[in-house]
Image (cartoon, helix red, strand yellow):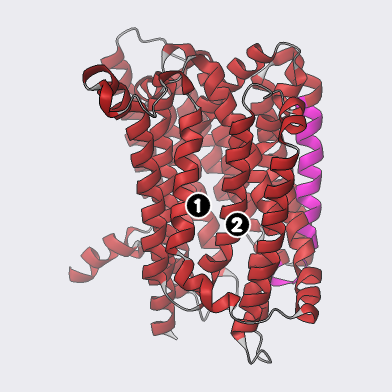
Amino acid sequence: MAEGMKRLAKETAIYGLPSILGKFLNWLLVPMYVRVLDGTGEFGIYTNLYAWVALLLVILTYGMETGFFRFINKKEEKEPLRVYSTTLFSIAFTSILFFSLSILFIHPISRALSYENYPEYLGMMAGVVALDAFTSIPYAYLRYAGRPVRFATIRFINIFLNIGLNLFFYLACPWLLKHMPETVDWFYNPGYGVGYAFVANVITSVTVFLLLLPTILPGIRIKPDRDLLRKMLRYSFPIMILGVAGIFNQTADKIIFPFLFDDKQYAEGQLGIYGACFRMAAVMVMFIQAFRYAYEPFIFARNKEDGNHRAYIEAMRYFIIFALLIFLGVMFYIDILKYFVTPDYYPGLRIVPIVMMGELFFGIYFNLSFWYKLNDQTWWGACFSTIGCVITVLIIVFFAPIYGYMACAWASFCCNLLMMLLSYVIGQRKFPIAYDLRSALIYFFVAGVFFTAGMLPYIDSLVLRLLYRTALLAFFVVFIVKRDLPLRELPIVGRYFQKK
């Protein structure tokens, strides 16, 4: 059993590292985008279209990735390739249909989304969505087949190729056009702006598809099973509803916002500011994901024989501690991090603490979600997400025309807070876990005091301001360690104590 947990931890790290690194490197592209694109409006287009991409990807996979794992691992399933083939053909059919309809109706769609001057942007992103939806199944098969190294290798190629192409189009090509124009003037148009981000994505998605062909071919050689497909669709449909509701909670602000203003240029500009500063707050998302990948396997390995839910309680406690530490760290050094964007985007910095705290609530909600997953009552998750969707949309529709993107930030905050509270209250009735509420409330209160103490006093000198906030952050760390952070139990630090 211990050996199995070690393998689980190892493979979790391999599968998780590309995702975390990809988010981090794409996050690092934002400083380049805000400096090379023509104003905040172009980044607004980028923000809006990629919000649509995230939503459409969930719709076009319609829960079949989860369904694939469920059915291919059934004890009675004697032909795993039959499940793979059925899933592959199903996703291929819907992806091709989606792309074909998108190209056929590209002009009406572009007019409806106010991109009538850029229909090729929508065409490229339709291709990216179709390819990425399809390749999600070969990726899933690599995970099933226990090939984490190949999985990670292709993901890394995906990440670095996309990064490289962006650097080529936005940094190398302008330099070459200035110094050696004959090398790039036959294909490079300096006025194409944000379009090159989409071109880079298309090239990357096509490359990944070609790299996955050896994994795809075994699946297309087997005839799909219609009866199996019907069973898989019945199983996967509720998961799709849950997924769509969940992703819409995260993207509704960026999708709806442009429709609420008659002045489209103003809307794109404001959305660009919001999107760039939202990316700054996404530091919380990346560290939360890293925590889940790196620390949860350790917690579960240590508590595999416990019968009192201690693992869930400890995981929640550590999650809150580190998430609050990250929150304070980002906010205390916001005067440095603001150079992540240009001064045109500085008005949007006020959303950062609101969005970060909202993401923290979502992380707690994720940790709480064990109760309905363990009870096979995932429809509760769909209910919570749907309620969250309604709240998000109502706040944005009624308040964004008055308060702008600040309403979007508060919508995210309120949505995640409500889902967290609902999941906790109902979960305690269905699957009681004695979470340490007293400790959580103390940490939130103390973090709030330190946050207020760090942000309110006006200190004109940047150096003194940073030194003051660093001292406060150090005191918060001391409070954590003194109160109840058992250093002996941390994976790396624990080894030091063992040697002693």
Question: Which residue is denoted by mark 2 in the rendering?
Answer: 367
Q: Which mark is residue 319?
A: 1
Residue 64 higher or lower than 419, as above or below = below
Separation (CA) of disc 2 from disc 1? 9 Å
Span of residues in magenta: 373-396
Q: Is residue 228 visible?
A: yes
Residue 459 higher or lower than 381, as above or below = above
Q: Percent position (x, y) of residue 247? A: 67, 46
Report if the CB atoms under discs 2 and 1 are less than 8 Å apart. Answer: yes
User: Which residue is drawn at the image coordinates 27% and 60% (left, top)?
Assistant: 493
Q: Quadrant of the N terminus?
A: bottom left
Q: Is mark 2 on a helix, strand or loop?
A: helix
Q: Percent position (x, y) of residue 375? A: 74, 72
| 266 lies left or right of 377 | left
Residue 86 higher or lower than 236, as above or below = below
Q: Residue lying farthest top? A: 460
What crowding class fits label 1: few (fewer than 14 Cα within 10 Å), some (14-19), or many (20 or more)?
A: many
Tag count in the figure?
Answer: 2
Residue 498 higher or lower than 37, as above or below = below
Magenta stretch prevailing secondary structure: helix
User: Which residue is drawn at the image coordinates 49% and 14% (left, top)?
Assistant: 39
- Mark 1: amino acid: Phe
Is residue 375 part of the magenta span, yes or no? yes
| 92 lies left or right of 21 | right
Q: Quadrant of the C terminus?
A: bottom left
- Mark 2: amino acid: Asn
The quadrant holding residue 97 is: bottom right
What crowding class fits label 2: few (fewer than 14 Cα within 10 Å), some (14-19), or many (20 or more)?
A: some
User: Which residue is drawn at the image coordinates 60% and 50% (left, top)?
Assistant: 364
User: Which residue is drawn at the image coordinates 48% and 37% (left, top)?
Assistant: 199
